Amino acid sequence: DQQVKQNSPSLSVQEGRISILNCDYTNSMFDYFLWYKKYPAEGPTFLISISSIKDKNEDGRFTVFLNKSAKHLSLHIVPSQPGDSAVYFCAVPIPSGGYQKVTFGTGTKLQVIP
Amino acid sequence: EAQVTQNPRYLITVTGKKLTVTCSQNMNHEYMSWYRQDPGLGLRQIYYSMNVEVTDKGDVPEGYKVSRKEKRNFPLILESPSPNQTSLYFCASSFGRGHTEAFFGQGTRLTVV
């Protein structure tokens, strides 16, 4: 059973507009969330993260919002640029027997149209 | 330059022929992981390692082995590859545990025929 879900496989946005990528999770005990970006033929790269003690974290054009009651987080990109076209994954570290696994969502492919 | 290096980048092999994909990081990170990426399934963690000689299963460990004899290296071993292990594999490392930023390698495209 998927503990982290990205229900939109793809998203198209005009350059300069806002991109909103969504992620839902199942367990209210999750306490940290990360977003990664992946270009074709490259490994994922870290983008931004948020702790469950916050409801917003901002880094330049990228802002992540966390709604704990809805078990939902979203990544906002404003303004969107063609170079933002990539696949975006949300990820959650999950305690596992004293260690920590990491579970990723299935990804959302963002296309920013010039 | 801080990096995670995987080799090979591309590999075509036959069913049952043992293979190893190497992964090395130069950042003195404690936490290392292997993932596979498949269409529609995202990234799924195969194995991870908290430190030297400390490894544990991720979500899809069947058919894989790992070892962590040195801090910098974390090879992925397929003792008897099967076609369902055809995938894109990524190694990653991070300073802390899963809640810290992970650095990924460039990926290894494996085809098992």
Image (cartoon, rainbow, N blue to C red):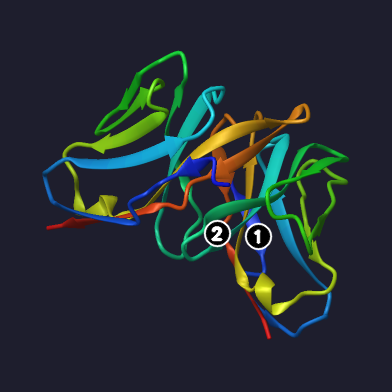
Residue B6's disc is 1
- The reply to whether callout 2 and callout 1 are in contact (CB within 8 Å) is yes
Does residue A107 sit above or below B53 in this rendering? below
Q: Amino acid at mark 2?
A: Gln
Compared to residue B50, the image places residue A83 above or below, namely below
Q: Is residue B109 visible?
A: no
Quarter of the image for the N terminus of chain B: give it: top right
Residue that protrudes farthest toward the top in the picture: A53
**Residue A109 drawn at (x, y percent):** 33, 56
Q: Quadrant of the C terminus of chain B?
A: bottom right
First along the sequence among labels 2 and 1:
1
Q: Residue at x 71, y 52 (%)?
A: B24
Residue sitting at x 63%, y 32%: A94
Q: How many marks do you count on the picture?
A: 2
The reply, left or right, for residue A60 in relation to residue B109 is: left
Query: How far across and how far down the image is residue B110, in percent?
Result: 64, 73
Q: Position of residue B21 (x, y in %)?
A: 73, 64
- Please state the horizontal and vertical placement of residue B14, each as a whole percent of the image: 75, 85
Mark 2–mark 1 Cα distance, whole angstroms, equals 7 Å
Q: Nearer the viewer, residue A106 or B34?
A: A106
Label 2, secondary structure: give it. Answer: loop
Mark 2 = which residue? B106
Left or right placement of residue A43 versus residue B16 in this view: left
Q: Are marks 2 and 1 on the same chain?
A: yes
Point out the residue furthest to the front here.
A1
- Residue A36 to residue B42: above or below: above
Q: Left or right? Give the position of A55 relative to B12.
A: left
Secondary structure, mark 1, is strand
Q: Amino acid at mark 1?
A: Gln
- The local crowd at label 2, few if under 14, some if 14 to 19, many if 20 or more residues have their Cα within 10 Å, is many
Viewer can see residue B21: yes
The chain letter for the residue carrying disc 2 is B
